[in-house]
Image: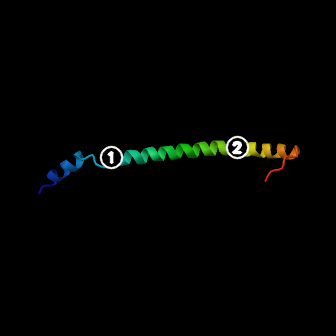
Amino acid sequence: MQLKNLTGPFLRDEDGAITVDWVVITAAVVGIALAVMITLGGATDDYSDTIASTMDARGVSSY
């Protein structure tokens, strides 16, 4: 069997292409989620500290 006869069907075969698409899409979603968490994480932490100190100043107990 010639190499040309084996490579033709292999190059035309599209099985597995959807898997690559899903891997790329999943990686993009995870990357965007991490970017959002990193961007908003510091601001959220600072805001929660402000809320906690305000509650302490007003005598609100927290558990």
Residue positioned 15% across, 51% down in the render: 4
| Residue at horizontal 60 percent and vertical 42 percent from the top | 36
Residue 22 screen position, x and y as percent: 40, 46
Mark 1 crowd level (few <14, some 14–19, many ≥20, 10 Å Cα): few
Q: Is residue 47 left or right of residue 28?
A: right
Give the quarter of the figure containing the N terminus: bottom left
Q: How are the colours assigned in the image?
A: rainbow
Q: Nearer the viewer, residue 25 or 57?
A: 57
Q: Residues within 10 Å of mark 2 (few under 14, many from 20)?
A: few
The reply to whether the C-beta atoms of the residues labelled 1 and 2 are less than 8 Å apart is no
Please tell me which residue is depicted at 44% across the width and 44% down the height of the picture: 25
- Residue position for label 2: 44
Residues at marks 1 and 2, CA–CA distance in whole angstroms = 40 Å
Q: Would you name the residue on which mark 1 appears?
A: 17
Amino acid type, residue under disc 2 in the picture: Thr
Q: Earlier in the sequence, mark 1 or mark 2?
A: 1
Q: How many marks?
A: 2
Counting from the top left corner in percent of width and height, residue 9 is at 19, 49
Residue found at the very far bottom of the displayed protein: 1
Q: Quadrant of residue 58?
A: top right
Residue at (16, 54) in percent of width and height? 3
Q: Position of residue 19 (x, y in %)?
A: 36, 48
Q: Position of residue 26 (x, y in %)?
A: 46, 46
Q: Quadrant of the C terminus?
A: bottom right
On screen, residue 9 versus residue 24, left or right, reads: left
Asked whether, in this view, residue 18 is left or right of residue 28, the answer is left
Q: Secondary structure at mark 2?
A: helix
Q: Secondary structure at mark 1?
A: helix
The kind of residue on which mark 1 rests is: Ala
